[in-house]
Image (cartoon, rainbow, N blue to C red):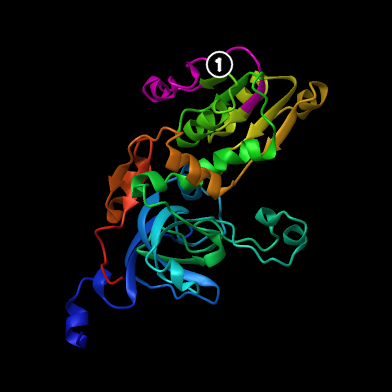
Amino acid sequence: MSAEDQAAAPAATRPGYMRAVVFDGQKAVWQPQRPLPEPQPGESLLKILLAGVCNTDKEILRGYRPDFQGVMGHEFVARVVRSDQPELTGRRVCGEINLVCHHCLYCRSGRPHHCSNRRVPGISGKDGCFAEYMTLPTELLHVVPDSLADEQAVYCEPLAAALEIPEQHHIRPSQELAVLGDGRLAFMVAQVLALSGAPVTVIGRHQDKLERFAPFARTLLQAEGTYEVVVDATGQPAGLTTAIALTRSGGRLIVKSTYADLSQIDMSEIVVREIQIDGSRCGPFEPALRLLEKGWVSLPEVERYQPEAFAAAFSSRAFKAVLDFRGSDQRD
């Protein structure tokens, strides 16, 4: 392509550039001409197909990660363009989001997700997936089964996060469980817990959303009763106070929410009632892909947006909004 042709071409098609949604420290901005990332040793270059909008992305806009600036997004399905493992080239993949050093105390003691030097795409120290291309360590990639559509595979990361709960704790079928929240993560969590055979109650604020939970859980618009295990998946500071009230004395509260604001709770109540509070974050991808492949979890249809319409995707009330990069740049 001549210099004149390059100058006349749309930014998204100029060699060496891509389109991206970038957080500049205060707001999300559209960059139609951002330099393409170059994979480092041990990394693969990925062409993003679909990128899922997560509540964490919205909380970043509210100040959840004030030190982060760069391409947003961490949920995706992509195609490998170049890789240090040539057999991956052309394959569809999902990717874990914890970039670790392998050398610190946490990495050496089997807790790499808490690496002292951890970087997280779209959240901390690493460009994310709200762009036509991204790079990621090849060790974090998982091949998507051919039988899964892109619209199914994009659920892998949040489903893996839900699977972290039984990965951390044995869920007994006789326990009464409650999930607080009626959003995307709550939908994944409730289904994973229901697979244990335990009775699950979902408490939310939107009747239309709660209707989706009915096949595998009891649903309530008003919190009532107490439960042996309660999962806070509200994404709101007030959810923690409600979750504590729902947790039986001697029971367990699992916190899945991340948000910009601070929560205030009565720690004396936690001590006197001997409530166990556990944080729960990222989870295993391979089991998530198996559940998706077997069709053992229900997946609402995603609502697709063109990348430049990211603001509409961020404000959407759809169960799952995604940015669709499949019709963009065809250089790969």
Q: Within 10 angstroms of label 1, few (less than 14), some, or many (20 or more) residues?
A: some
Q: Can residue 179 be seen by looking at this rendering?
A: yes
> In terms of image quadrants, where is residue 114?
bottom right
Which residue was labeled with disc 1? 223
- State the image coordinates of residue 235 (x, y, percent, origin top left): 53, 36
Rendered position, 286 above or below 107 = above
Residue 83: where, in percent of width, then height?
Answer: 46, 72
Rendering coords of residue 5 (x, y %)? 17, 82
Seen in the picture, residue 311 relative to 93 is either above or below; the reply is above
Residue 332 position, x and y percent, is 31, 70
Q: Residue at x 41, y 48 (%)?
A: 153
Residue 74 included in the magenta stretch of the image: no
Kind of residue sitting beneath label 1: Ala
> Magenta region: which residues?
203-230
Foreground of the two, 193 or 229: 193
- Which quadrant of the view contains residue 38? bottom left
Please tell me which residue is depicted at 45% across the width and 22% down the height of the picture.
205
Residue ranking furthest to the right: 272
Q: Total label count?
A: 1
Q: Does 211 appear in magenta?
A: yes
Q: Residue at x 26, y 62 (%)?
A: 328
Can residue 262 be seen at all in this image of the molecule? Answer: no
